[in-house]
Amino acid sequence: MTTAVTFEEQTNVSGGATMSGRRTLRAYAIEAKYESLRMLRAPSFGVIFLSIPVLIYLLFGVVIFGHALQSDPTAAVAVFTGFAVFGIMGPAMFGFGVTIAMEREQGLLRFKRALPAPTAAYLVAKMLMAMLFAAIIMITMGIAARFVAHVPLPAARLIGIGATNVIGVLPFCAIGLFIGAIVKGAAAPGFTNLVYLPMMYLSGLFFPLPKALAPVAPIWPAYHLNQLALSAAGGSLPGTKTHLAVLMGVTVLFSSLALRRLRRAE
């Protein structure tokens, strides 16, 4: 009798038809919690992606160009937002692209579908993990910018930039998801870098691009997120709706393509 009841309850949960809203939210929360803990405890992921952005920002924003930036507040803000966008790109793209490719190859996605849990919990957990990493990165970089680099930004502006970038991880999650859905695990780091590295330099995050390359910058979502971050910093930049539309379009397009591919593959 106990076995039959247990099986029936598991069937109802996996089907999702009788799963209450509270239990559904709890399932999402548990999945997100352990996904975040897993990535935070992985030195090759957590330590690198949480420490590298703030360390590189301090190197360039304080040690190398600190004196010049203190005399040019506009440049100081632009350097901060550029490195902030660079910082949140990595956890999103690699957290999806590499881990999904490897887990898909190992059969984990098929196993997850058989578990009594909401179907989308696996991907939502990875998305929340990327947002958590982005939040931690923005907190550490905000502290460095305010108290070490002395960037002339009030706390409210720093919070606005942080919120923009935390939400702004979504298009990079979508790109990583697409890469993870179409390549094998061993090839995923290389393919992710093929997108990550050109976008990092050609989107104009760190320095103004030459005139010959300037038209290339709007191709990359990092450019549009950086423009929104600059607007959150107080800059009166035109085209906010366009930047939002591009980022939303990238998110929807690559998520749809990736999910379609994952359904066909499984």
Image: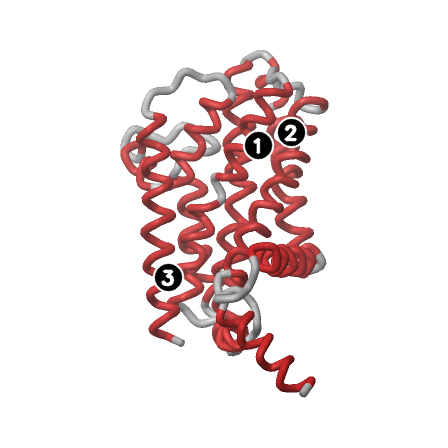
Position of 110 relative to 204 (above/below)? below
On-image quarter of the C terminus: bottom left
The local crowd at label 2, few if under 14, some if 14 to 19, many if 20 or more residues have their Cα within 10 Å, is many
Q: Is residue 258 visible?
A: yes
Residue placed at 62% from the left, 39% from the top?
A: 135
Residue type pointed to by label 1 = Gly
Q: SS of the residue at dot 3?
A: helix
Residue placed at 50% from the left, 45% from the top?
A: 89
Residue type pointed to by label 2 = Gly
- Residue 33 picture quarter: bottom right
Residue 258, numbered label: 3
Whether pointer 2 and pointer 1 mark residues with C-beta atoms closer than 8 Å, the reply is: yes
Residue placed at 56% from the left, 74% from the top?
A: 115
Position of 121 relative to 69 (above/below)? below
Which of the two labelled residues, at mark 2 and mark 1, occupies the earlier sequence position? 2
* Residue at the front extreme of this rendering: 1
The local crowd at label 3, few if under 14, some if 14 to 19, many if 20 or more residues have their Cα within 10 Å, is many
- Residue 8, image x and y in percent? 57, 79
* Foreground pick, 257 / 146: 257
| Distance of label 3 from label 2 (alpha carbons) | 33 Å
- Residue 217 picture quarter: top left
Residue 162, numbered label: 1
Residue type pointed to by label 3 = Ala
Whether pointer 3 and pointer 1 mark residues with C-beta atoms closer than 8 Å, the reply is: no
Residue to which mark 2 is pinned: 142
Position of 113 relative to 130 (above/below)? below
* Residue at the top extreme of this rendering: 71
Which of the two labelled residues, at mark 3 and mark 2, occupies the earlier sequence position? 2
Position of 132 relative to 12 (above/below)? above
On-image quarter of the N terminus: bottom right
- Residue 106, image x and y in percent? 53, 77
Nearer to us of marks 3 and 2 is 3
